[in-house]
Image: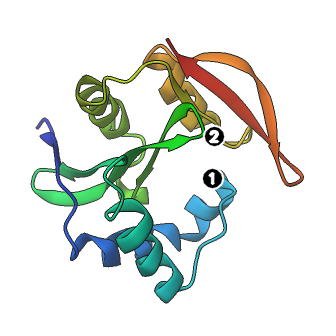
């Protein structure tokens, strides 16, 4: 049975699912991103993500179930992308399908991503979609791979 991956706009009700996904211990380990407290998380999403017209964000659904999100934002003159999928959706090709759909809609180029160097699955996913390594950056004491899609 093939899974039907779609993108849609993010709704307020999605935020609780995204919060739970951010608090998954294995996701925290792989992303090297510390989970935020609920109020901080919700405020960030409402004001800095959903409240910013320069940010493009989409919810990922699989057979109608919310699986995660993809987002593009500006840091200075660079457009970055990021994504988060719930653990139950890892390793099934869902990220590959969702990122392809997202890159069709997010047409700004170049695009950048800087996953944690230890998150080899995320690096591979980006490279599969044409992102090329351009170096490394440090976020605190942690190395991240800088990738660019031209």
10 Å neighbourhood of mark 1: few (<14), some, or many (≥20)? some
In this figure, what is the number of numbered marks?
2
Report if the CB atoms under discs 1 and 2 are less than 8 Å apart.
yes
Please state which of residues 62 and 101 is positioned toward the viewer in this rendering.
Answer: 101
111, above or below 116, in the image:
above
Q: 122 or 11: which is nearer to us?
A: 11
Percent from the top left, x then y, of residue 74?
50, 41
**Residue to which mark 2 is pinned:** 115
**Quarter-wise, where is residue 140 in the image?**
bottom right
Mark 1–mark 2 distance (CA, rounded to whole Å): 7 Å
Residue ID at (31%, 63%): 50
Name the residue that disc number 1 marks: 31
Local secondary structure at mark 2:
loop
The answer to whether residue 2 is above or below residue 7 is: above
Residue 150 drawn above or below residue 97: above
The image quarter in which residue 138 lies: top right
Of residues 77 and 68, which is closer to you in this image? Answer: 77
Horizontal side of 100 relative to 73 (left or right) equals left
């Amino acid at each position: 049975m093939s899974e039907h991956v779609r993108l849609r706009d993010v709704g307020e009700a999605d935020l609780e699912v995204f919060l739970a996904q951010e608090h998954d211990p294995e996701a925290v380990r792989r992303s090297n991103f510390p989970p935020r407290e609920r109020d901080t998380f919700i405020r960030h999403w409402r004001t800095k993500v959903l409240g910013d017209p320069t940010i493009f964000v989409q919810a990922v659904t699989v057979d109608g179930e919310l699986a995660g999100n993809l987002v593009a934002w500006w840091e200075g003159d660079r457009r970055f992308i990021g994504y988060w999928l719930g653990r139950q959706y890892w390793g099934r090709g869902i990220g590959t399908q969702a990122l392809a759909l997202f890159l069709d809609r997010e047409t700004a180029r170049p695009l950048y991503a800087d996953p944690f160097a230890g998150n080899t699955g995320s690096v591979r996913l980006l490279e599969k979609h044409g992102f090329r390594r351009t170096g490394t950056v440090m976020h605190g004491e942690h190395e991240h791979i800088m990738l660019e899609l031209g």
